[in-house]
Amino acid sequence: MSNNMRALIIGLAGPALSALGTLWVLANVLIDSGRELTFRYVIFDPGHLVIAAGVMISVVSIPVAFQVAAATPEDLELDLFEPDPAEQPSEAPADIPAEWETAE
Amino acid sequence: MIDIASLGSIIDGAGALPHHELHGYIPEPAESHHLFGAAFLFIGVLLIVETLAGSVWHRNRLRTTLWPAAIMSLGAGMVAVTALEPNDRLIHFTIGMIMLAAGWLEYRHRMGEVPRRTADLLILPALVAGALEIGVFHFHGSFDNSGSVHVLMGVTAAIMVFVRVYQSRLLASAPRHALTGIVIIAIALELMALSH
């Protein structure tokens, strides 16, 4: 997948989700038009929450989309997070201090 | 010095508060499920974004820790639900602790302190326990909206175990990484479908 295609998907993920949430709200209005519009309903209704999630995703992902568009293909490989073997404690026995050896 | 006797009476008093007095401030169970669903949707989509962005995503340390921090926050939220919601306290508390522990290990893995295999030693049994609790113990024996969705969520959590193992076998695979995000989105939609 090209950089631009990746950037486009990343950049549109949040707005697309918000659009889906808007459709959800509109469908809800058509199905259940008699519902009273209260503050509590707005903040806990799934449709409104999907819109809010989409906005929050946009805030995080749109700057990432610009960085991805300008990145090299190597930058787009997944990080593995495995610890560096050189930093792991070695299984070889530690050096014994000289004074311990002479204690006997 | 804190007077233990008076502290005890305060705790007893808080526990004895009628639920209807707090009703205006505490989300109903359905509302809590919808909130948690939105949070899962947020992190599920961001996991897919992370897959597409690769190393670019990790140029910012905050973004690297977003996924484990979100899981730990949701776990803390679940423990808060235990304090506020009188029903199914043990189930909510256990799932909350599982999420806290799993998030912490995922954080340490992402910081390069713990290998993936070590993290999975806790995360996989935690997912199995979560699947059993949601799908079996939280089922309550009825296939109404709540029962059906809880069984479905239990099955999805069990699928998550296999997805995690599948991903661990080839960590560099982008599709396997994205699959985790897709399963999280499925759990989010199931939570939003709960009407109780």
Image (cartoon, coloured by chain):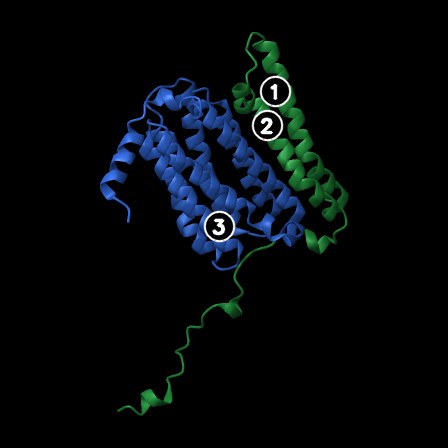
Chain colours: A green, B blue
Could you give the CA–CA distance between mark 1 and mark 3, rounded to whole angstroms? 33 Å
Q: In this view, does B143 lie above or below B106?
A: above
For mark 2, give the secondary structure: helix
Sequence order check, earlier mark of 2 and 1: 1
Count neighbours of disc 3 (C-alpha within 10 A) and say few if under 14, some if 14 to 19, many if 20 or more: many
Q: Where is residue B164 in the image (x, y as percent from the top left)?
A: 49, 45
At label 2, the amino acid type is: Val
Q: Where is residue B43 in the image (x, y as percent from the top left)?
A: 56, 39
**Subunit ID for the residue under disc 3:** B
At label 1, the amino acid type is: Trp
Q: Where is residue A8 in the image (x, y as percent from the top left)?
A: 74, 38
Are the residues tagged 3 and 2 within 8 Å (C-beta)? no
Q: Residue at position x 57%, y 27% from top?
A: A49
**Subunit ID for the residue under disc 2:** A
- Residue at the disc numbered 2: A50
Give whichever of B95, A85 is nearer the camera. B95
**Same subunit under labels 1 and 3?**
no
Left or right: where B164 falls relative to A66 = left
Q: Residue at position x 45%, y 42% from top?
A: B161
- Residue at the disc numbered 1: A24
**Subunit ID for the residue under disc 1:** A
Which image quadrant is residue B75 in?
top left
- Residue at the disc numbered 3: B106
